[in-house]
Structures are given as C-alpha cells and as structure tokens.
Amino acid sequence: MALKCGIVGLPNVGKSTLFNCLSNAKAQAANFPFCTIDPNVGTTTVPDERLTKLADIVKPQNILPTTVEIVDIAGLVKGASKGEGLGNKFLGNIRECDAILHVLRCFDDDNVVHVDGKVDPVKDKEIIDTELQLKDLESVDTKMKKYEKLAKVGTDKDAVKTYNALTKLKNTLESGQSARACALEENELPFIADLHLLTIKPVMYVCNVDEASAKTGNKHVDAVKEAVKNENSEILIITAQMESEIAALETFEEKQMFLGDMGLDEPGVNKLIKSAYKLLKLETYFTAGVKEVRAWTITKGMKAPQAAGVIHTDFEKGFIKAEVIAYNDFVTLGSEAACRDAGKLKIEGKEYVVNDGDVMHFRFNV
C-alpha cells in the first residue's frame, strides 16, 4: 500500500528544502519563486524502531521498511484555480496524492524573499485554501449540472443521493470551508468519490521555523494553531534548514550528536512521516524470517485477509489462517519458537482485526 504525500505551499516557504530532507531525490532549492517547475518525486523510508529490533533478533538477510512517496509540487499562487502560475497543472498533481503536507513559512528573514512581501502564515494558508476550494467548487458545479434534472424527477434514487451530497459540498465550499469540513454521511462518500476533491484530502500543516523556535514554536506558529483549531488536521513544527544539515551528515552517530546539541530526540522529518501515518489512519504489521524482516502498511481496522492481500492478491484470495504474534511478546521472548512454546502464537481467522505491530505469517491456498 503506497502512501503518496504532496508538499504544497506558496513559493519560498521551504517546500523544496523539506523535500530534499525527506526524499532520496534532490530538488533545486533557490531563493526565488517557481524554482520547482515540474513536480519532483522521491521516496523515503518510514522510520520504525520496531523493525530494527526485530531484525536484531531474527538476523535476516534483508531488512525492508515500508516507504512513502513524496511529491514536491511547485509553489501555488493566488489565481492558481484559474491557471495562474501554471496552477492547473499543479492542482492536478495534488489530486493524485493521498495527503497534503501544507508548508507554512513561520520565520522572519529579510534575506529570503516572501512572495507577498510580508510573513503571515495564516494569510498564506488562506490563499492556498481558497485556490483549492475554488477548484473543488468548479468540479462540484460541473457534476451538479449533470444530475440536477435526474434529481428533480426523483425516480433514480442514486441520482437524488448524489445531488444531495453535491449540494452539501457546494454549500460548504461557498462558505469558505474545505470539503473535509462538510458533514457528509459515510454512505454519501461513494457518490462523490469520482471527483477526487482536493480539499477532502487529509492535511498536515508543517510550520517551518527558525532554529530558535524549533522546540517551542513562535508567534507565527501560535497564529496557525488558532486558525486551524477547528479543523481535523495535524500541525508539525520543523526547521527545514536544520533538517537539511542533519540529512547531510554521513553517520547515525553524527546525526545523534547534532540532535543532542540541539536538544532534540529525533529528526523532524521522522516525526513528519509518523504524523502522516496517523493522519491517514495507517498502521504497520511485520513479517519476520531468515530471508527478510519487512514492514507492511495497512489501514487501521483492516482484517487479516485484506492485510495478507497487501503482500499479494493471491494471499487474500486463498486465505486460510494467520499466525499472529504480538510485537511485544516477540521482542520479550526473543524468537518465534519461544512464543509458540509460551502460547503467545495465536491462530486467527478471517474476522481477525490486525493490530499495529503484529508479527504475522499467512497460510493460504490458491
């Protein structure tokens, strides 16, 4: 299950610098707007200390963490929904992502140009929100025209439900709110899924601060927190420039020493990826054998057959049983055999809901 996050924001807020820290790819980071003309795409591994501990016990030939795909989308500007600043192309790039990482400039520096000449992260957020909302409103209006007559006749129940859901969305968007704030029922979501709305996607606000504000934030961060307090979103404080310095260090020991000097426990990019998982309600289970110890990404609440299908569709189709060991039991007892002897290896069926951290082996037949 590949997770794809799009980094958005106004020009010169630190998007490309953050992308460089997150990704194996390297984007140009320059002090002028639109230095990223085409969306840069890269991957980063999901930090998970549990994978390392399992590997220390099993000593496999390979260790395979799960990954996240990161898309650095060029800086949006006011008017993007109408094509300004190459807006249409980049709004399309956002549409393909699972979640949005909205970078906001929360630092003052006269040497770094702000596109509007003044540092105001709340205003910056509103500019991006408005452009995305206008694009969504355009999509909603287009679909409403197709269903209006059918809904008025009333004989097609699905058409009526679709039109009602679209009406709710239209009212929400026209009030200046994002689609994620719309009070849609769970059974209404399938009727609007084909729109791939931009503002229905989960969002994390990444407050890019200076080094002095890395731990506690500042007045700009406080303003952002107040502005988004009623949104179902995540907020993360990060110093993109400092993260780039950490990423440039060659050894783990050097990175730990740097973090220690700054009074931090782990790189901000690690927290960002973990927060993205939480935002999307994702969890991890593991497979552990002598050939490889591997992490697999699943949706919270997923049952055993569907989790098996993440490895291969045949595993889901031919699912028989799952052998399950809780992560803490595996680490405490030190091996699969010890867990089996202690009665900690459980045989679960099709209704078993996988827990975060489960170590699993699937029995299947095709």
Image: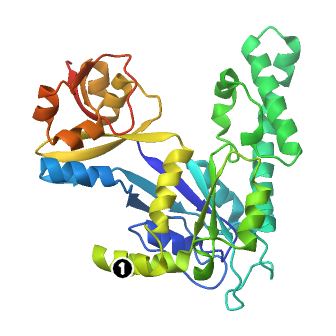
Is disc 1 placed on a helix, strand or loop?
helix
Decide which of 75, 55 is in the foreground and name it.
55
Instruction: Give amino acid for label 1.
Output: Met
**Outermost bottom residue:** 111
- Residue 192 falls left or right of residue 258: right
Image quadrant of residue 82? bottom right
341 up-or-down from 271: above or below: above
- Which residue has dot 1 on it? 257
Residue 28 makes an appearance in the image:
no
Q: Position of residue 38 (x, y in %)?
A: 55, 68
Q: Tell me, yes or no, if residue 272 can be seen here.
A: yes
Going 43% across and 54% down the picture, which residue do you hit? Answer: 68
Name the quadrant of the N terminus: top left
Q: Which residue: 44% across, 55% down?
A: 69
Vertical relation: 301 (above or below) 16: above
Residue 254 placement, left or right of 220: left
- Residue 180 rendering spot, x and y as whole percentages: 71, 41
Reply above or below: 319 against 313: above
Dot 1 surroundings within 10 Å: few (below 14), some, or many (20 or more)? few
In the depicted view, which residue is nearer to us: 199 or 333? 333
Taking the spot 69% from the left edge, 58% from the top edge, the residue there is: 88
Query: Horizontal placement of 284 versus 114: left or right?
Result: left
Q: Nearer the viewer, residue 253 or 285?
A: 253
Residue 27 drawn at (x, y percent): 48, 74
Total numbered badges shown on the rendered structure: 1
Residue 365 appears in which quarter of the rendering? top left
Q: Nearer the viewer, residue 335 or 300?
A: 335
The C terminus appears in which quarter of the rendering? top left
